[in-house]
Image: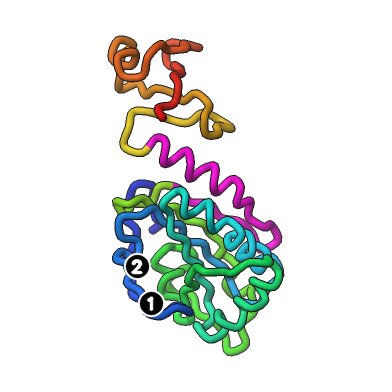
Amino acid sequence: MALRINETVPDFKAETDQGTIQFHDWIGDSWAILFSHPKDFTPVCTTEFGAVAQLADEWEKRGTKVIGISVDGAEDHKKWKGDIENYAGTKAGFPIIADKDLAVAKAYDMLPAEAHLPEKATPADSATVRAVFIIGPDKKLKLSMTYPMTIGRNFGEVVRALDALQATYEVPLAAPANWTPGEDVIVALSLNDEQAEAKYGKLDKKLPYLRFAKAPK
């Protein structure tokens, strides 16, 4: 069954290139991003891991831990990181999960339960392991995206989505299309006009059900 928004994400114990982790414990009280890849030493994935490495300061500013996953082993991950760092021009300090048995890929519904890798597996055998999961401090799934192998992920959009999620987390607000930090936000319909203005100030009412307010700092 597919993993749904606001469901608690599966916990798991796994080896990474930086040692063994228990996923929920590793997340702790942080936000987390799990981004998956079908195989090490593949071209598009190398550019994506490089992009994640280059955004290290941005993840830290947002209190967010990032972790990769690939269906190869930890030793391969360590070797691949050399290529990633050479390409990106910076250290790739995040861990990469070794998912050779596909347990995590299956738990997160990236592969069917009966999936297995042949002896000489290619990226095509695990092509659907190409997802991004943004997870809240409550260990619940907040957003997911899935891309084909031929399309590199836009990590600028991942950062924007993370900003929007954090700005609207556990408050009656929503982010409109193309929202970026500093722009007005939408007030949820759970508040009437009087309640909304008491909480967020003057409203910009575009429609009875579409009311904008200044984003809280």
Q: Does 107 appear in magenta?
A: no
What residue sits right under mark 1 in the picture?
A: 14
Q: Is residue 19 above or below residue 119?
A: above
In the rendered view of the protein, which quadrant contains the C terminus? top left
Amino acid at dot 1: Ala
CA gap, disc 2 and disc 1 = 8 Å
Instruction: Locate residue 168: give its quadrant.
Output: top left
Amino acid at dot 2: Phe
- Return the disc, 2 or 1, that comes first in the chain's sequence: 1
> Dot 1: what SS?
strand
What residue sits right under mark 2 in the picture?
A: 23
CB of mark 2 within 8 Å of CB of mark 1?
A: yes
Residue 132, image x, y percentages: 51, 56
* 197 left or right, relative to 114: left
In the rendered view of the protein, which quadrant contains the N terminus? bottom left
**Residue found 50% across the figure and 12% down from its top:** 206
